[in-house]
Image (cartoon, rainbow, N blue to C red):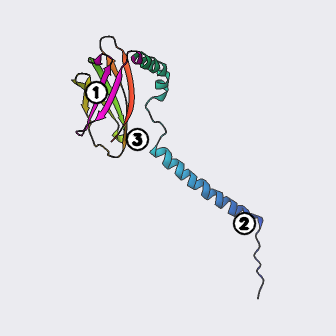
Amino acid sequence: MSKSTFRIKGWHVLAGFIAFFGLVFGVNAIFIIKATRTFPGMSVERPFEKGLRYNQTIKARLQTQQEGWVANFSLEDSNAVMVKFTNENGPIDGLNVTVHLVWPGLPHQDQQLTLQPSGPGVYKSQMSGLVFHGRTLEFEGQAVRLKDNLVFPFKGRIKV
């Protein structure tokens, strides 16, 4: 039986070290590139400007809360988004209502809708595209009262 003459030398350790960490860094680079290409990190458009307007949003919510405004949301079987606005005096008419619909995880399905009056305090619009049953539809919008430009920001979720 012959003795093995192979001995691990310093350059073997260095080569193994470089190969191991080169592989780790290479795989990390692939994951980072794939992650940033599929989700850039922004969940809203122009987040800085929206953040600057947040105090206005808080003021508008307090003002409409003092007036007793309530918004009830629903999604009808015919892909129609419906919002009903009421206060202590009953339904609220004379509003311009816009809604931004968000399907979490499906940004290509997001929609901006302008709702039309459809009855006392009721505003509706037809959604284009598919309704993803078993998912949650998130939305935020605003109603502007025409006579004095009072803005009522609202947001919510509907389990479809």
Q: Nearer the viewer, residue 128 or 160?
A: 160
Side (left or right) of 64 relative to 121 = right
Which residue is under mark 3? 104
143 is within the stretch colored magenta: no
Residue drawn at the location 26% of the way across and 17% of the way down: 94
Q: Secondary structure at mark 2?
A: helix
| First reached walking from the N terminus: tag 1 or tag 2 | 2
User: Relative to 29, does residue 115 appear above or below in the rendering?
Assistant: above
Which residue is under mark 1? 114
Residue 100: quarter of image: top left
82 is within the stretch colored magenta: yes
- Bin the neighbour count of mark 3 within 10 Å (Cα to Cα): few under 14, some 14-19, many 20 and up: few
Q: Amino acid at mark 2?
A: His
Q: Amino acid at mark 3?
A: Pro
| First reached walking from the N terminus: tag 2 or tag 3 | 2
Q: Position of residue 2 (x, y in %)?
A: 77, 86
Looking at the image, which residue sits at the far bottom? 1
| First reached walking from the N terminus: tag 3 or tag 1 | 3
Q: Position of residue 114 (x, y in %)?
A: 28, 27
Which residue is under mark 2? 12
